[in-house]
Amino acid sequence: MPKMKTKSSAKKRFKMTASGKVKAGQAGKRHGMIKRTTKFIRDARGTTTLCEADAKIVKKYMPYAR
């Protein structure tokens, strides 16, 4: 059986934790910061872990990152 390919867009956007969860950057911080509240900007710093439903989709794109 041939090797499976990793989705290039996924490997640039997501990382796996040691326990197998998927880390991703926070959404909603690219532009339009004036209309966002200070609390939103503060809470959206750094990275977050995806919920199980989204993580399941991302894991299909990254077969060797488990």
Image (tube, rainbow, N blue to C red):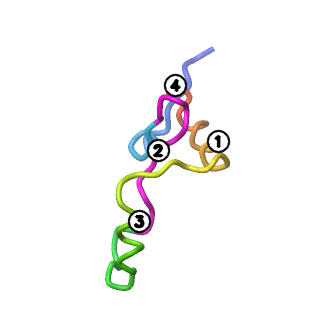
- The residue that disc 2 covers is 23
**Residue receiving disc 3:** 43
Q: Earlier in the sequence, mark 1 or mark 2?
A: 2
Which region of the structure is painted magenta? 16-28
Task: Look at 35% across and 60% down and name the residue there.
Answer: 45
Secondary element at tag 4? loop
Residue 58: percent from left, percent from top: 57, 42
**Where does label 4 land, which residue?**
64
Q: Amino acid at mark 2?
A: Lys
Q: Is residue 15 left or right of residue 57?
A: left
Is 56 covered by the magenta stretch? no
Q: Name which residue lies at 61% across and 36% down.
A: 60
Please, which residue is most extreme toward the right here?
53
Query: What number is the disc on residue 56?
Result: 1
Of badges 1 and 2, nearer the viewer stands 2
Position of 19 compared to 52: left or right? left
N-terminal label among 1 and 3: 3
Q: 10 Å neighbourhood of mark 3: few (<14), some, or many (≥20)?
A: few
Foreground label between 3 and 4: 3
Quadrant assignment for the N terminus: top right
Calculate the distance from the C-alpha at mark 3 to the C-alpha at mark 4: 31 Å
Sequence-first disc among 3 and 2: 2
Lower position in the chain sequence, tag 3 or tag 4: 3
Q: CA distance from mark 3 to mark 2?
A: 16 Å
Task: Please say if the residues under marks 1 and 2 sit with CB atoms less than 8 Å apart.
Answer: no
On screen, residue 63 above or below 29: above
Between 12 and 32, the one nearer to me in the picture: 32
First reached walking from the N terminus: tag 4 or tag 2: 2
Quarter of the image with the C terminus is: top right
* Amino acid carrying mark 4 in the image: Tyr
- Residue 20 highlighted magenta (yes or no): yes
Estimate the spatial distance between the alpha carbons at disc 1 and disc 3, rounded to whole Å.
Answer: 25 Å
